[in-house]
Image: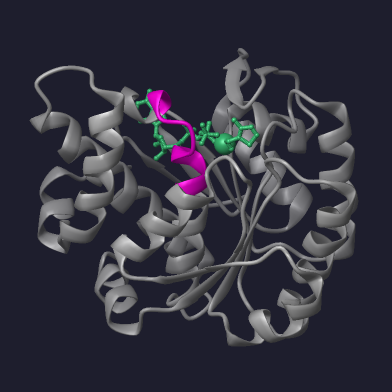
């Protein structure tokens, strides 16, 4: 685990270009900003070239797009490849909506993604494995999640993060499991979207080691949430979300090391 990447991220303050969804865009921007990166969002294809060039990494969220926005998403992914910027995709709800899955598969033929971050329902869909996803949620399935994540990584030639109570990070061969977190994450819509953009921020400072970036991002984010939850007097989703933003700013390498549980 390369926790020194957290300090590098804060020192370098990389610009992270996000095509977000309209539901969680502000959480994504504030999560990145609070952690120590510099978010920029865009909905205009005419500025895509300039924005990709100035960015340290690009995060594409497939949460809620129109056909026009899809053209923008595709162009931005192609530009990330052209300018050799780390490219992260969050394939929201592709396990539940066939149209989204087809769109995602078409996009993955237009550009090479470096890291895909999704829940079990989304990653199972990518791997072509049986799973009952439910809307944006992971849903139910009895397949082995490590096998599913490895299959998705091998099929898409990238690092895959299958997030949930345990985050599984794999490049198809190597596997790391981050066991930190809190069920409160599930009570805040956009926890996954925040994680995906934070993965991009770590990728920006990783020197091309996307497996290390993905692990460290998962550990820092889940540990921050766990630290917040441990101080709350009850299950308070609104307070959790607010304090998570605070904790992303405050959390230190030493604090993450103290609570870290991974294998
Ligand atoms: N039951 C849980 N216990 C501990 N941590 C959890 C739990 N569920 C999710 N997490 C954490 O929540 C974060 C987001 O992952 P999750 O799999 O919920 O994303 P998601 O389903 O895409 O969320 P959304 O689409 O609602 O934003 C990760 O850091 C993950 O470790
Ligand atoms: C609720 C919701 N619907 C489309 S995107 C989104 C936020 C989670 O990505
Ligand atoms: Mg999600």
User: Where is residue 53 drawn, in percent x and y?
Assistant: 65, 87
Q: Position of residue 259 (x, y in %)?
A: 15, 43
| 240 and 44: which is toward the camera | 44
Residue 261 locus on image (x, y percent)? 24, 40
In the rendered structure, the answer to whether residue 112 lies left or right of residue 144 reads right
Task: Tell me if I can see residue 262 in this picture.
Answer: no
Q: Residue at x 67, y 33 (%)?
A: 122
Does residue 44 sit above or below 119 in this rendering? Answer: below
Ligand 3 quarter of the rendering: top right
Q: Is residue 257 left or right of residue 123?
A: left
Quarter holding the N terminus is: bottom left
On the rendered structure, is 128 left or right of 192?
A: right
What secondary structure do most residues of the magenta stretch adopt?
A: helix
Q: How is the image coloured?
A: one colour
From the viewer's side, name the closer residue of 18 and 208: 18
Residue 107 occupies quadrant:
bottom right
Which residue is at a point 80% across and 71% down the rendered structure image?
Answer: 45
Asked if residue 69 lies in the magenta stretch, the reply is no
Q: Which residues are magenta?
A: 186-194
Residue 22 sits above or below residue 31 on the image: above
Query: Residue visible at 36% across and 65% down?
Result: 33
Image spot of residue 190 (x, y percent): 49, 38
Left or right placement of residue 237 versus residue 88 in this view: left
**Total tally of numbered discs in the picture:** 0
Q: Is residue 66 visible?
A: yes
In which image quadrant can residue 13 be found?
A: bottom left
Is the C terminus in the top left, top right, bottom left or bottom right quadrant? Answer: top left
């Amino acid at each position: 685990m390369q926790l020194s990447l957290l300090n590098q991220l804060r020192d370098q303050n990389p610009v992270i270009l996000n095509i977000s969804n309209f539901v969680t865009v502000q959480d994504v921007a504030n999560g990145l900003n609070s952690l120590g990166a510099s978010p920029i969002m865009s909905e205009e294809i005419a500025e895509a070239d300039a924005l990709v060039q100035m960015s340290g990494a690009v995060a594409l969220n497939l949460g809620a797009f129109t056909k026009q926005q899809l053209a923008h998403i595709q162009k931005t992914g192609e530009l990330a490849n052209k300018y050799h910027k780390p490219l992260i995709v969050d394939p929201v709800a592709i396990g539940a909506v066939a149209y989204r899955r087809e769109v995602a598969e078409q996009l993955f033929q237009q550009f090479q993604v470096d890291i895909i971050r999704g829940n079990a329902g989304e990653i199972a869909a990518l791997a072509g494995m049986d799973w009952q996803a439910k809307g944006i949620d992971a849903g139910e399935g009895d397949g082995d999640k490590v096998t599913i994540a490895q299959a998705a990584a091998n099929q898409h030639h990238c690092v895959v993060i299958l997030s949930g109570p345990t985050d599984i990070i794999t490049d198809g061969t190597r596997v790391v499991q981050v066991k930190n977190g809190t069920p409160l994450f599930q009570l805040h819509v956009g926890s996954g979207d925040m994680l995906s953009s934070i993965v991009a921020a770590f990728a920006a400072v990783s020197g091309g080691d996307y497996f290390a970036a993905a692990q460290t991002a998962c550990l820092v984010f889940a540990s921050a949430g766990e630290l917040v939850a441990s101080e709350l007097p009850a299950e308070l989703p609104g307070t959790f979300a607010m304090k998570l933003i605070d904790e992303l700013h405050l959390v230190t390498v030493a604090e993450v090391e103290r609570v870290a549980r991974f294998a």
